[in-house]
Amino acid sequence: MDTLNSNTSRKPWIAFAVVAVIVILFAALVMVMPKGFKSTHEEIGTGKPAVVFVYDNGLAVSNSQTEQMNEARDYLGDQVHFLIARMGTPEGDLLIAQYRADSAELLLFDPAGELVKRQPAMKYAGELVQWVQ
């Protein structure tokens, strides 16, 4: 009878431990996932520089460039807005037309919202940091 009671009293602790491990793993997964980029552009000209990447689903460089942008964002923090202009969306197509941007092009806007630099992708994280500063 003692064996039955000890097994019964251990079951809630085992269940708690399993749930705790699942929660910890989920939190770790969320922390290492890349952050998304806003595809709206109202943050341009709001007092911080903004880097806008013209994202083209058909080009492999688009994924590579956004990975590098994530690394640069980790370094720069909230000093710079990192945005995308996704081709084929109303917001993206409007910005692309307004600035005559090309597919997979990076645009740098100053804190006042003026376009100051543009360059075709691929820029690595370190280059992006220098480019913005």
Image (tube, rainbow, N blue to C red):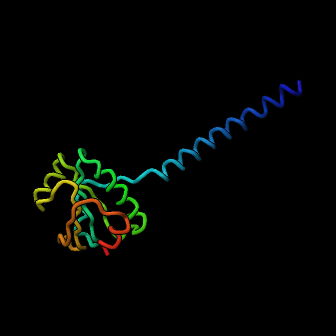
- Residue 10, percent from left and from top: 77, 34
| Residue plotted at (27% across, 73% down) | 47
Q: How many marks?
A: 0
- Left or right, residue 107 beside residue 10: left
Left or right? Give the position of 104 relative to 11.
left
Q: Residue furthest top?
A: 1
Q: Quadrant of residue 54?
A: bottom left
- The residue under the point 22% across, 55% down is 104
What residue do we see at 29% from left, 52% from top? 61
Q: Residue 74 location, x and y as percent? A: 42, 63
Q: Where 26 sits versus 38, above or below? A: above
On screen, residue 130 above or below 56: below
Q: Position of residue 46 (x, y in %)?
A: 25, 69
Give the residue at the far bottom of this rendering. 133
The residue located at (39%, 69%) in the rendering is 76
Residue sitting nearer the eye, 10 or 26: 26
The quadrant holding residue 18 is top right
